[in-house]
């Protein structure tokens, strides 16, 4: 019989635990284009996405762990660009991107030299496509109450775990009971991991 008639020799389903809260890991970021451009805002290349429900604008991002015991695991998050409810979500998004640039380009947050300031500038969101940086991973619950991972923040050169992660040394606080998956987890649906506790103004 064919593979799609007899499933006795198919692999058993894998169980994928969430990555432990507080894990520091090197990740690679990619952006799922949403097709929205606004050159006056610096949104070019079709990377931005606008919610049809709220009007909020964001980058729909995927982060893949590149090294260590959780290599190839994927985490989905949004980076806020604009919210009809006020500037706070955009300010958080700009702060996160600044952290990504500091982390990926080895810049101390306090470095205000002309060179550092230039390195915190991008020509467009295309410059963030494929960027690798050190992230701090957290755990939250999705809309169904299931545990999921979120990217909490970018780890900069002045913070604990940065040097180890950038040198590819494992820095994750892995519990003894955890068994790292042998293959990449496949999500049941391709949706960004949006923290359920996101404030009302970010909805």
Image (spheres, helix red, strand yellow):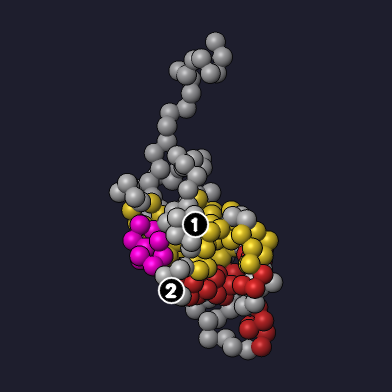
Q: Which residues are magenta?
A: 195-203
Q: Is residue 184 or residue 187 the one in the foreground?
A: 187
Q: CA distance from mark 1 to mark 2?
A: 15 Å
Residue at image point 49% right, 66% down: 80
Q: Quadrant of the N terminus?
A: top right
The percent coordinates of residue 141 (x first, y second) are 33, 53
The percent coordinates of residue 130 (x first, y second) are 63, 59
Residue 19 is tagged as none
**Residue 30 location, quadrant:** bottom right
As helix, strand or loop, the secondary structure at mark 1 comes to loop
Q: Is residue 96 rendered magenta in the image?
A: no
Q: Residue furthest bottom?
A: 113
Residue 86 is tagged as 2
Chief secondary structure of the magenta portion: loop
Residue at image point 50% right, 50% down: 74
Report the side of 133 relative to 115 (left or right): left
Q: Is residue 9 or residue 192 the one in the foreground?
A: 192
**Residue 202 location, quadrant:** bottom left
The answer to which of marks 1 and 2 sits earlier in the sequence is: 1
Can you identify the residue that label 1 sits on?
51
Residue at image point 42% right, 36% down: 14
Residue 79 seen by the camera = no
Residue 85 seen by the camera = yes
Local packing at callout 2 (Cα closer than 10 Å; few below 14, some 14-19, many 20+) is few
Q: Residue furthest top?
A: 1
Report the side of 155 relative to 201 (left or right): right
The percent coordinates of residue 177 (x first, y second) are 33, 47
Q: Is residue 8 or residue 114 the one in the foreground?
A: 114
């Amino acid at each position: 019989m064919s593979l799609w008639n007899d499933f006795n020799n198919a692999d058993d389903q894998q169980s994928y635990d969430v990555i432990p809260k507080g894990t520091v890991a090197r990740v690679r970021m990619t952006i799922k284009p949403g097709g929205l451009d606004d050159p006056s805002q610096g949104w070019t290349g079709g990377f931005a996405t606008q919610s049809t429900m709220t009007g909020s604008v964001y980058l729909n991002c995927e982060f893949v762990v590149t090294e260590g015991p959780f290599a190839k695991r994927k985490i989905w998050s949004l980076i806020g660009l604009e919210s009809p409810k006020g500037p706070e979500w955009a300010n958080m998004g700009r702060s996160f991107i600044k952290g990504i640039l500091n982390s990926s380009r080895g810049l101390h947050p306090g470095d205000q030299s002309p060179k550092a300031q230039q390195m915190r500038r991008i020509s467009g969101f295309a410059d963030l496509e494929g960027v690798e940086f050190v992230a701090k991973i957290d755990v939250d619950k999705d809309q169904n109450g299931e545990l999921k991972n979120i990217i909490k923040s970018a780890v900069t050169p002045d913070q604990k775990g940065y040097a180890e992660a950038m040198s590819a040394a494992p820095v994750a606080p892995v519990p003894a009971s955890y068994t790292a998956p042998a293959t990449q987890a496949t999500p049941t649906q391709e949706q960004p991991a949006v923290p359920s506790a996101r404030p009302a103004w970010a909805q």
